Amino acid sequence: MPTAIILLKNDPKKITGTAEKLLEIPAVTDVYSISGRYDLLVMIKCDSIEMIESVVTDHLLKTDGIVDSETMFAFKSYDKREGGKAIDVD
């Protein structure tokens, strides 16, 4: 299943509210508050890359509090539950 990892910079006063709103988006599987240059890390899983594009541009980036973003796509997942074997995320 296509997976995107989105790093978000947020208005510091709105991080918790933004994270809660992002979790309301059906394709969003996880939201993490993180340290470093970004404030939140968001995981999205959809049936296609086109659906991820729609979720990111039509929903996620319109969420109040987001000031910048960087989107990455996962090529493989190395899952501990699968004995460390690589799993394609197509």
Image: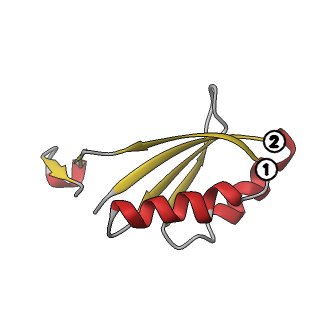
Q: Position of residue 52 (x, y in %)?
A: 44, 61
Residues at circles 1 and 2 in contact by the CB criterion of under 8 Å: yes
Which quarter of the picture shows residue 72?
top left
What's the amino acid at mark 2? Asp
Relative side of 11 to 55, left or right: right
Quadrant where the image shows the N terminus: bottom left
Q: Amino acid at mark 1?
A: Gly
Q: Nearer the viewer, residue 90 or 33?
A: 90
Whether residue 10 sits left or right of residue 76 in the image: it is right
Q: Check disc 2 and report the residue beneath it.
A: 11
Q: Position of residue 40 (x, y in %)?
A: 63, 43
| Residue at the (16%, 54%) spot, across then down | 82
Q: Secondary structure at mark 2?
A: loop
Residue appearing at x 52%, y 64% in the figure = 55
Which residue is depicted at the point 64% across and 26% down? 37
Percent of width and height locating residue 32: 58, 48
Q: Position of residue 62 (x, y in %)?
A: 70, 59
Question: As displayed, is residue 37 above or below residue 21?
Answer: above
Residue at the extreme right: 13
Q: Earlier in the sequence, mark 1 or mark 2?
A: 2
Mark 2 is surrounded, within 10 Å at the Cα level, by few (under 14), some (14 to 19) or many (20 or more) other residues, namely some
Q: In the image, is residue 72 above or below residue 30?
A: above
The residue that appears at 24% across and 55% down in the rendered structure is: 89
Residue at the top extreme of this rendering: 36
For residue 20, what is the image quadrant?
bottom right
Q: Is residue 55 above or below residue 19?
A: below
For the C terminus, which image quadrant?
A: bottom left
Nearer to me, 22 or 54? 54
Separation of marks 1 and 2 at Cα, in angstroms: 5 Å
Q: Which mark is residue 65?
A: 1
